[in-house]
């Protein structure tokens, strides 16, 4: 009853850890020849951290990341719109973490290999297609030695936004959808600001900066690694070097737009100039689809529900996906009934997240303030009542599955000690 997993990113590795925890055989096939700590910063919401703690990864998270204390929205001139505590400070039973995606991925990988052995992840094996058989499923992979067919009881595709498995299920879908927003992402060694563990967003729909530390300050310098994203929106019909996405960028291409973004608590141009290298990405997602599952094959993570990086729930949702799959395998056995039960729980929720992130995510409050007063005010209460700000923030938490009261009261997805019979 081996589970075959395509992809050793956050989704696939968390599923591997979950399957090992509940006693289900598995094997992960990863396209790259060697896993390396690539990428920049991500946030892990308390709903995902809860699941990671239940996998026994609390020490690993504290080693590779920092517990986020607060989350705030600001105007393009640095005026505070809305700030709220996060994690334990907000009343959750679990913290929120800001981490380097690559370091987090490697922590998951090292934990999995330490528990299940090095043979559980096969590198240099790119998922190409799938087929259902009479009593299982087959993942077809491409390797340096040639194509191979890997049989299993079920196949779970965690192969990302460009998923070959999703492409087979949805042959007419086409490439990811670009909304015209360009993201320049990097890290800079700089002095922490606000609480020292603050995540901030400043600006409005067509231009903004996102920043948060992803590690503790160096005792010698007082500086921490600050992850930042500079974003601008252009006319999508212009193309904007679509053939060069995910390339190293020259800060001179976008720094002038942020040159006067100097707040009394953060110097944005200095933050941008301090990066050793900057990468350019498109803001893309895909439309929700009506089904993720064909027989004994299903999608998870970005293969199932790629969404804009709004609300800090991309990696968090992938982790929750893995845990729900594990729970449904325990309930229904390793077969198609479990996959359909997983999809029934997760797909409607993530469809709401995808659509909310296209315009009514938590950051929409910044454009509301920009529209009402141009981002200039004496008191935010004169622009937006506090009750409206609080209601907007809580609405998104409920959509994304990390409302404080609901999460704290929810039973464990996988009961402690549960094992497959």
Image (cartoon, grey):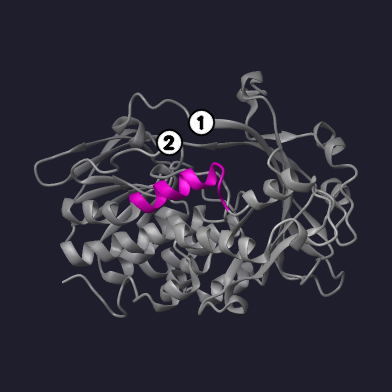
Tell me which numbered mark, 2 or 1, is placed earlier along the sequence: 1
As drawn, is 151 to the left or to the right of 301?
left
Please tell me which residue is depicted at 46% across the width and 72% down the height of the picture. Answer: 50
Judged from this view, the residue extending furthest toward the front is 382
394 inside magenta stretch: no
| Quarter occupied by residue 147 | top left
Query: Which secondary structure lies at badge 2?
Result: loop
Q: Quadrant of residue 205?
A: top right
At x 60% / y 67%, what residue is drawn? Answer: 97
The picture places residue 111, in percent across and down from the top left corner, at 46, 67
Distance in Å between CA atoms under marks 2 and 1: 8 Å
User: Which quarter shows the C terminus?
Assistant: bottom left
Q: Which mark is residue 287?
A: 2
Packing grade of label 2 (10 A; few <14, some 14-19, many >=20) is some
The residue wearing badge 1 is: 177
Q: Are marks 2 and 1 in contact (CB under 8 Å)?
A: yes
What range is drawn magenta here?
A: 347-361
């Amino acid at each position: 009853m081996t589970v075959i997993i395509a992809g050793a990113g956050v989704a696939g590795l968390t599923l591997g850890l979950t399957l090992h925890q509940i006693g289900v055989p598995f094997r992960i096939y990863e396209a790259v020849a060697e896993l390396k700590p690539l990428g920049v910063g991500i946030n892990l919401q308390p709903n995902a951290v809860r699941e990671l703690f239940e996998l026994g990864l609390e020490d690993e998270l504290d080693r590779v990341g920092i517990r986020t204390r607060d989350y705030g929205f600001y105007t393009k001139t640095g005026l505070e719109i809305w700030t709220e505590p996060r994690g334990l400070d907000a009343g959750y039973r679990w913290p929120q973490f800001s981490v380097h995606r690559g370091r987090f991925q490697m922590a998951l990988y090292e934990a999995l290999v330490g528990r299940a052995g090095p043979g559980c992840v096969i590198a240099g094996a790119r998922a190409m297609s799938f087929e259902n058989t009479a009593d299982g499923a087959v993942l077809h992979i491409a390797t340096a030695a040639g194509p191979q067919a890997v049989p299993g009881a079920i196949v779970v595709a965690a192969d990302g936004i460009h998923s070959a498995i999703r492409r087979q299920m949805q042959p007419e879908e086409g490439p990811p959808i670009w909304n015209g927003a360009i993201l320049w992402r990097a890290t800079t060694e700089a002095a922490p600001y606000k609480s020292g563990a603050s995540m901030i967003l400043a600006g409005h729909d067509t231009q903004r900066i996102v920043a948060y530390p992803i590690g503790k300050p160096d005792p010698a310098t007082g500086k921490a690694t600050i992850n930042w994203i500079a974003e601008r929106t252009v006319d999508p019909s212009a193309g904007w070097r679509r053939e060069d996405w995910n390339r190293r960028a020259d800060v001179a291409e976008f720094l002038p737009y942020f040159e006067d973004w100097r707040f009394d608590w953060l110097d944005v141009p200095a933050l941008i100039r301090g990066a050793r290298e900057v990468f350019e990405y498109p803001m893309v997602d895909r439309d929700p689809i009506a089904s993720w599952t064909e027989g004994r094959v299903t999608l998870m993570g970005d293969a199932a529900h790629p969404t804009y990086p709004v609300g800090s729930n991309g990696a968090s949702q992938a982790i929750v996906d893995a845990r729900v799959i594990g729970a449904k395998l325990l309930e229904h056995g390793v077969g198609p009934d479990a996959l359909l039960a997983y999809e029934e729980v997760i797909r409607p929720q993530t469809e709401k997240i995808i659509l909310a992130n296209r315009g009514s995510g938590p950051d929409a409050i910044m454009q509301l303030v920009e529209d009402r007063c141009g981002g200039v005010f004496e008191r935010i209460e004169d622009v937006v009542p506090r009750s409206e700000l609080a209601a907007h923030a809580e609405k998104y938490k409920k959509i994304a599955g990390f409302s404080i009261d609901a999460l704290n009261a929810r039973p464990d997805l996988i009961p402690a000690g549960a094992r497959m019979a």
